[in-house]
Amino acid sequence: MRELLILRENHIYTFCMVLFPILVIFFFTSLMDDGLPTDMPVGVVDMDNTTTSRSLTRKLDGFQMSKVVARYPSVTEARRAIQRNEIYGFLYIPKGTTEKLISSRQPKISYYYTYTTMAAGSMLMKDMKTISTLGSAGLGQATMRAKGLTDAQIQTLLQPIKVDLHQIANPWSNYNAYLSTMIVPGIIMLFILLISAYSLGTELKFVTSKDWIERADGNITVALLGKFLPQTVIWLAIVYSYEWYVFYHLGFPHLGSPWMLVLLGLMQVLASQGFGIFAFGLMPSLRMSMSICSLWAVLSISMAGSAFPVMGMDDSLQSLSWLFPLRHYWMMYQTCVFNGFPLIESWFHFVALAAFMLLPWLVVKKIKNAMLTYVYIP
């Protein structure tokens, strides 16, 4: 009852445990609601200005991810447009392209794209590369039909190897399902870490720590359970609401059992709380413990292995990645939920999250000593 009154009276808990997590969930999932970015601006420098070159421009504009917004008189003007962030790339069709195509003299079509934004650059590169291939294939197809070749013979000559592409688990290349399932849990874990350290630090700040220990009859274990049980219930409600929203309402791909989602959410909350309590036990200071938690949570988004694979990092960073709860959460998610493998396939990450849950046992005596003897220093 004491902790419930504290949660009700201190509005920081309301904002950081309910309002901000809900805002984060809706913000990130709605930000990438289309799955992939569409109608990204591109330009065209058409020095040939023939029926064939204009057809290439129309085909590029017809792609879902590309939208031709301008035609430039020179490469210099198009390059300046990229530098002004008006377009992400442009297609350059030099003079004489159609003539060389007809005479089979292999013309060169160039495409330029910015990699300042890697997602936009790589997607537009794919579109413009496809356009350059379609241009030569279209003219070659017309020429071979005039010579009397059948469609099967033409297909064999134009595309001798047919690619059969299978994108496992996320065949739509949905960036929302790929990024939101890591960023949103990572930010929720950030709030859990901060609130866990904050709730202990404020006992010292507001000189209520001795009263807290006395109410538990001097038993620090009972005191910690009493303090964090209401928080755990609230965090579980937030996490399970998030899982229902993204996996069942938005339809994010999930091949695993619903019980795996329940287990994963429980491990996420308890491991984060365990690390937050442990951080305060290492440094029984409101400011220092919250600084450790915020630093660890922010770094974990980079070390989780979603944006950049851990196996591509230096050996020292690969070893360091095991110290972040989000890394183990992400590995369990992509193994047991995203791909539907049994829990035994990620048993090591399950054990690691369980170890984070048990970390407070290493510092319970130090936390009790701090609550009884430490004086808060701003």
Image: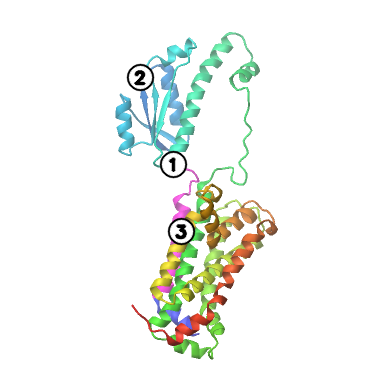
Image x and y of residue 182, in percent? 52, 55
Residue corresponding to mark 1:
118
**Which class describes the residues within 10 Å of circle 2: few (<14), some (14-19), or many (20+)?**
some
- Tell me if residue 222 comes above or below residue 170 in the rendering: below
- Tell me if residue 26 comes above or below residue 149 in the rendering: below
Residue corresponding to mark 2:
47
Disc number for residue 135: none
Task: Give the image quarter of residue 76.
Answer: top left
Question: Quick one: label 3 or label 1, which is nearer the N terminus?
Answer: 1
- Tell me if residue 349 comes above or below residue 168 in the rendering: below
Image colouring: rainbow
Question: Quick one: label 2 or label 1, which is nearer the N terminus?
Answer: 2
Residue corresponding to mark 3:
299
Estimate the spatial distance between the alpha carbons at disc 3 and disc 1, rounded to whole Å. 21 Å
**Which class describes the residues within 10 Å of circle 1: few (<14), some (14-19), or many (20+)?**
few
Is residue 266 toward the left or the right of residue 2 in the image? right
Q: Magenta residues? A: 11-37
Residue type at the position of mark 1: Met
Estimate the spatial distance between the alpha carbons at disc 2 and disc 3, rounded to whole Å. 49 Å
Is residue 291 toward the left or the right of residue 263 in the image? left
Task: Give the image quarter of residue 237.
Answer: bottom right
Camera-side mark, 2 or 1: 1
Residue type at the position of mark 2: Met
- From this viewpoint, which residue is outermost toward the front? 316
Estimate the spatial distance between the alpha carbons at disc 2 and disc 1, rounded to whole Å. 28 Å
Name the quadrant of the C terminus. Answer: bottom left
Kindly indicate whether the residue at mark 3 contacts the one at mark 2 (C-beta within 8 angstroms).
no
